[in-house]
Image: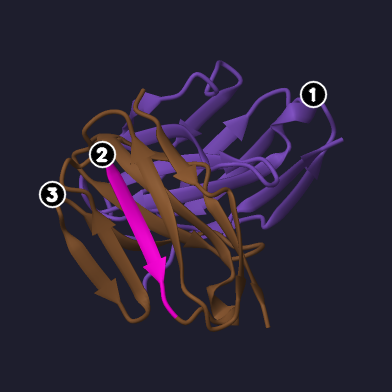
Chain colours: A purple, B brown
Amino acid sequence: EPEVTQTPSHQVTQMGQEVILRCVPISNHLYFYWYRQILGQKVEFLVSFYNNEISEKSEIFDDQFSVERPDGSNFTLKIRSTKLEDSAMYFCASSGGPGHGYTFGSGTRLTVV
Amino acid sequence: GQQVMQIPQYQHVQEGEDFTTYCNSSTTLSNIQWYKQRPGGHPVFLIQLVKSGEVKKQKRLTFQFGEAKKNSSLHITATQTTDVGTYFCAVILNDYKLSFGAGTTVTVRA
């Protein structure tokens, strides 16, 4: 079964540093997403990406966040100048289109120290 | 934005028993999806409901969409230890955003 692949599985970074979280969505999917989940809490929407541009973003997705699809397969989330409160599990997801279920990756656990 | 409330937040179930988790909205929903997240895992898509009064079954799981399309339920019969995890309902707000409820975390007593 096709999978969404995320790397790294765990990232520890110092406060103020930049991190890049990487994702390889399912190859024939056109819609890509980033979600985050603080330990024990709900899954929160960050951003969606379609047709090589951001289609929607949440209030969490401020100027310290950016997304990019640098080539035909990768989808990245960059967090500039990380803060302690950015510590969370970050999930990438992709879908075949509106009304389809999302396929989530296994996540990157980001720990900011 | 559209919010869904899930109840209960926690469900402790004796193995072999049935339980139901509910997802409620104050507004009419166009559709609803259900996901399961095992402890330490990622959300996995279970099902999508679109039609008023729709009922879908997956083995011991029964999903229902209310007649008014304002609520949904997930009923699990004969609970097994493999049912442990958090069950989320989620609503598609537009073409580009899926919003999750807070989830029902299920533990099973053997």
As measured in the structure, the alpha-carbon distance from the residue carrying label 2 to the one carrying label 1 is 44 Å
The front one of B55 and A86 is B55
Between circles 2 and 1, the one closer to the viewer is 2
* Residue drawn at 49 percent across, 47 percent down: B7
Number of marks in the image? 3
SS of the residue under disc 2: loop
Residues at marks 1 and 3 on the same chain:
no
Of all residues shown, which one is farthest toward the left? Answer: B51
Principal secondary structure, stretch drawn in magenta: strand
> Is any part of residue A17 visible from this angle?
no
x then y, percent, for residue A12 = 80, 45
Q: Earlier in the sequence, mark 2 or mark 3?
A: 3
Does residue A4 show up magenta in the picture? no
Q: Amino acid at mark 3?
A: Ser
Q: Chain of mark 3?
A: B
Q: Which residue is mark 2?
A: B70
Examine the rendering and report whether any part of residue A34 can be seen: yes
Residue of label 3 = B52
B100 with respect to B11 (left or right): left
Q: Check the image and report above or below for A59 versus B56.
A: above
Would you call the spot at circle 2 few (<14 residues within 10 Å), some (14-19), or many (20 or more)?
Answer: some
List the residue tagged with mark 1.
A16
The image position of residue A78, as x and y in percent, is 59, 33
Sort mark 3 into few (<14), some (14-19) or many (20+) by Cα contacts within 10 Å. Answer: some
Of all chains, the one bearing label 1 is A
- Residue A62 percent location from the top left of the image: 55, 17
Task: Identify the secondary structure beneath mark 3.
Answer: loop
Residue B74 among magenta residues: yes
